[in-house]
Amino acid sequence: MRFLSAPPGGQLEPDASGLPAPPQHAEEKRPDLVVAPLLAFDRFGGRLGQGGGHYDRALAELRRTGPIFVLGLAFAGQEVDRLDLEPHDQPLDAVLTEAGYRRLPQA
């Protein structure tokens, strides 16, 4: 996963998924905040993604190079009691749902 700067004027082009994105030659940036999609989360900062590990690998690399804040974006109904996490799973710092914003302590 790469984090690219949007060019002035917003000239975006389709990425590998067909979504508008900065061109591949755009300047690479290190974000301070990552908004992470998820299928489920728990009150300890656990996050269940789509199973590809893309966010876990990217977040692990970002955390190796400095602080990063990870915000999960979810519906309140996606909260579960406790996720069975693996060592490579990266925690959320907070979650935002239609019920509000909540900081999450890491397990």
Image (cartoon, rainbow, N blue to C red):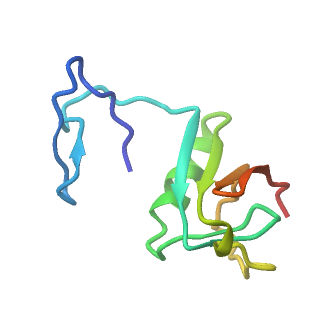
Q: Is residue 90 left or right of residue 83?
A: left
Between residue 41 and residue 58, name the one nearer to us.
41
Q: Is residue 15 left or right of residue 106?
A: left
Q: Is residue 22 left or right of residue 64?
A: left
Between residue 37 and residue 2, name the one nearer to us.
37
Identify the residue at the far top of this view. Answer: 8
Q: Which quarter of the figure has residue 72?
A: bottom right
Q: Is residue 79 above or below residue 34?
A: below
Residue at (35, 30) in percent of width and height: 28
Between residue 21 and residue 62, name the one nearer to us.
21
Identify the residue at the far front of this view. Answer: 99
Q: Is residue 96 above or below residue 21?
A: below
How many discs mark residues in the rendered view? 0
Q: Which quarter of the figure has residue 52?
A: bottom left
Q: Is residue 50 left or right of residue 2?
A: right
The x, y position of residue 9, in whole percent, is: 20, 19
Quadrant occupied by the C terminus: bottom right
Residue at (16, 28) in percent of width and height: 11
The x, y position of residue 62, in whole percent, is: 56, 42
The x, y position of residue 32, in whole percent, is: 58, 32
Between residue 95 and residue 34, name the one nearer to us.
95
Residue at (49, 68) in percent of width and height: 53
Residue at (60, 36) in percent of width and height: 65
